[in-house]
Amino acid sequence: MFKISPASNESERRTAADACGVPLIDGSFIYRMTDAEDGHLLGMSQFEITASGGVLYHLREIPDGHDFEAMFILGRATMNFVDLCGTHTMRAASAASDGSDGSLLRALGFKEFDGSLIADLTGMFDGHCGGHK
């Protein structure tokens, strides 16, 4: 099992970014995914919410991590938070898919639009089975 929670202080933010090999972006939010039993870091998402929507900067596991389903859940938790904050569009920065084929972002609901990966969050988390396809 794992736990997803926001990084609550600068030390947690820096530790997560360093462990996942990404630069820390000032003013960004970070969600940490940790092992529920021993608390060690498994992955992180780094994102922000702007007037024009959410931006996913990084969605990364620690090196040698290979758990697609856990990363999917971390990605969806991040997207749900952005949606709950009242913005219903999210863009994946190019760094979000560095080192992967983009399959995780596409599984999360991001689609190619004008050269960017965009996710429409409208209705994605409202509990209806017929939501996004």
Image (spheres, rainbow, N blue to C red):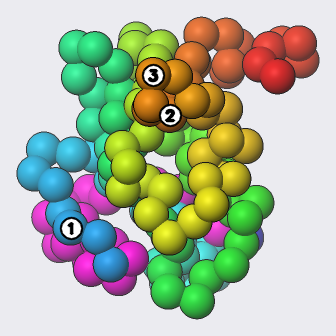
Q: Is residue 7 visible?
A: yes
* Number of marks: 3
Question: Which residue is at 40% across, 11% downward?
Answer: 86
**Snapshot quadrant of residue 132:** top right
Q: Which residue is at the far right?
A: 129
24 to the left or right of 7: left
89 to the left or right of 23: right
Return the residue at label 2: 117
Question: Which residue is at 49% across, 80% downward?
Answer: 62
Magenta region, residue range: 2-20
Question: Which residue is at 73% across, 43% downward?
Answer: 107
Dot 3: few (<14), some (14–19), or many (≥20) neighbours within 10 Å? few
Return the residue at label 3: 114
Label located before the other in sequence (3 or 1): 1
Rounded to the nearest angstrom, the CA distance separating label 3 from label 1 is 26 Å
Q: Is residue 18 magenta?
A: yes
Label located before the other in sequence (1 or 2): 1
Dot 1: few (<14), some (14–19), or many (≥20) neighbours within 10 Å? few
Return the residue at label 1: 23
Query: Front-most of 9 and 80?
Result: 80
The quadrant of the rendering that contains the C terminus is top right
Rounded to the nearest angstrom, the CA distance separating label 2 from label 3 is 8 Å
96 to the left or right of 14: right
Task: Please identify, in this view, whether the residue under mark 2 or under mark 3 is nearer the observer.
Answer: 3
Dot 2: few (<14), some (14–19), or many (≥20) neighbours within 10 Å? many
Q: Position of residue 9 (x, y in %)?
A: 19, 61
**Snapshot quadrant of residue 91:** top left
Q: Position of residue 127 (x, y in %)?
A: 78, 17
